[in-house]
Image: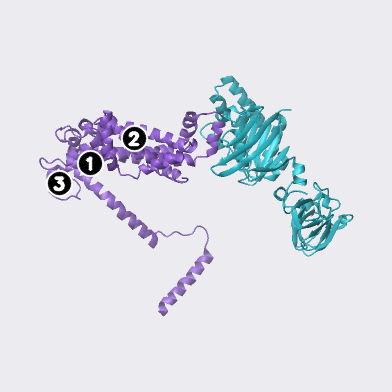
Chain colours: A purple, B cyan
Amino acid sequence: MSQTSTMAGASRVAATNAVQEARGPRPKPFFTPRKIIIYSLLVVFSMYYLFPLYVMFTTSLKSMPEIRFGNIFALPVAPNFDAWVKAWTSACTGLNCQGLAPGFWNSVKITIPSTIISIFIAAVNGYALINWRFKGSEIFFAILIFGSFIPYQVFLYPMVIIARELGIFGTLQAVIIVHTIFGMPILTLLFRNYFASLPQELFKAARVDGAGFWRIFFEIMLPMSLPIFVVALILQVTGIWNDFLFGVVFAGTQNYPMTVQLNNIVNSAQGTPEYNVNMAATVLTGLVPLAVYFVSGKWFVRGVAAGAVKG
Amino acid sequence: MQNSVSIRDLSLNFGSVKVLEHLDLEIAQGEFIVLLGPSGCGKSTLLNCIAGLLDISDGQIFIGGRNVTWLEPKDRGIGMVFQSYALYPQMTVERNLSFGLRVAGMKKDEVEKRVARAAEILQIQPLLERKPANLSGGQRQRVAIGRALVRDVDVFLFDEPLSNLDAKLRSDLRVEIKRLHHRLKNTMIYVTHDQIEALTLADRIAVMKNGVIQQLADPHTIYNRPVNLYVAGFIGSPQMNMFTGTLSDSTFTTEDGIVIPVETYAFDTPATGSTAAVLGVRPEHIVLGDETAGMPFTIDVEIEIVEPMGSDTLAWTKIGGQAITFRCDSDVVIATGHKVRIGFDPARGSIFSAETTNRL
């Protein structure tokens, strides 16, 4: 007891001395309890996400006998890309044995038009909702947002009927239209909030200068909106690329996107499961969203923050 | 002579909120009008209505004798300058200036001629290739004015153009706007909450409150003969000294029983009997020491606080229970605790009815 109080006293004296001698930048010790806790938590959470990726990647480079050996965390003895080649060119998705390649191109054919059309319409929506308020624009917006709270599965059956009646069920157009519609609420919200954060006076100045709806949109608003377009692009590309439900329901067998074909490879009931091929196919399917994230992640954060300032 | 801008019975409602009510305003050709008032008084709203950026609920707007009530902003013959400059950030100064002309489909050589002329008037030729982000606040505001200038319009609208600038730049640009007005002789409508800007720039000031024009007159009249208590209190810094009391015949008795003779005051409406009233006297109309000789009202007071302002000195004291300020020459030696004699002539003051708050 007495010893601790002396120690406390001593440290207090030391502290006073330190304060009197204080000069220049404040010392920043690295090993403080706070930092140790923060970094351990970060490490634990990173492991949580990185370990499955590690297992997936190493397994895809192993041969089947090596996998059967059972050491899933071990590094591959003789790493090779045979499984990747097989997954891409000759793995069997149901009855077809052409690998993932056709699925990849189907996904591209679905993702690119869906992304462009949905982003364009949503940008015009958001711009009109903020700058060209019309009677009932608030109600229109409320209904649109309400749509984003209803689970997709609820819409599935009516959408199938509509697609059938339009004669487009089982085609690329059907998936593209469905993706465009379901991307609308969140994208419109995103663009609306971003345009709301731009100064209203710019819009007024352009109107005094005589510019109309499209001219202001293309010449004034769009050049200022790159960050939010990148956000929308990432959201749509990852969302549509990773979609399984709409692809399997609306696209038709010959247009199945990569995710559906991946499922068919991994869940095939015949023969022994080829884990290395399954893992390679999974990594291949995930590469596109991963690449998009790494290329534009910086913009993503910036755009989300910019849109969040005003609502 | 035909009026340049004429606003007739203008009303604007946002839902059930009445922002502007039955407002009339006639502005002569070449006149510099300032709309002055606190934030939320409807002055910027009125400007936006004139510009056509807001749809009005009732009434008519004429510009240059033309009914523009239903016209688009670009067809009204107006140019507008905004508080935040509102320059298009991705365009160079030159493209900013020419945007409106290009939208209108004007020929290239004519566009260049007009941009060159505006740049010359505002002395921004060296900045033409820069982007707005690389300009200072004052330069940006010049470009914003230039954008209105190139359109060769009859009426300029300014929406608090100097509010984002620091004090020094503000007074520089203020003089420049005045010079511009002398040179161009356009009609200008200028919105501000800064009374110095209003008093220095305006041919006439419209003092606004709650969407209603309280007084429309030249700066001298606004300052010296305010029509009601609101205008009297809003204009002038430090504020006009206000005594509440009773007016009967030719004497004003404050709440503390101090009697102030007001025979010299020129009444707009002659007072009858005894009424509750407010007597207002501007700080610079109160005199000190020997100058009080001959003043209808004098009194001995003790100085409470002295604020030297450089060019003159403000002193705080009390008449009865009423705290007052007065302005005196900066060379006069006074200090807290000094006992001095002060006086004023009510002829230079203003008397308002306490009931209606209007000038008597």
Q: Nearer the viewer, residue B149 or B221?
A: B221
Distance in Å between CA atoms under marks 3 and 1: 17 Å
Report the mark closest to the observer, 3 or 1.
Answer: 1
Mark 1: secondary structure: helix
Asked if marks 1 and 2 fall on the same chain, the answer is yes
Residue B323 falls in image quadrant: bottom right
**Does B24 sit above or below residue B305?**
above
Q: Nearer the viewer, residue B233 or A24?
A: B233
**Which quadrant of the rendered structure holds the N terminus of chain B?**
top right
Which residue is identified by label 3? Answer: A67
Q: Residue at x 59, y 20 (%)?
A: B109
Which residue is identified by label 1? Answer: A282
Q: Nearer the viewer, residue B348 or B275?
A: B275
Which residue is identified by label 2? Answer: A180
Q: Is residue A38 left or right of residue A107?
A: right
Distance in Å between CA atoms under marks 3 and 2: 42 Å
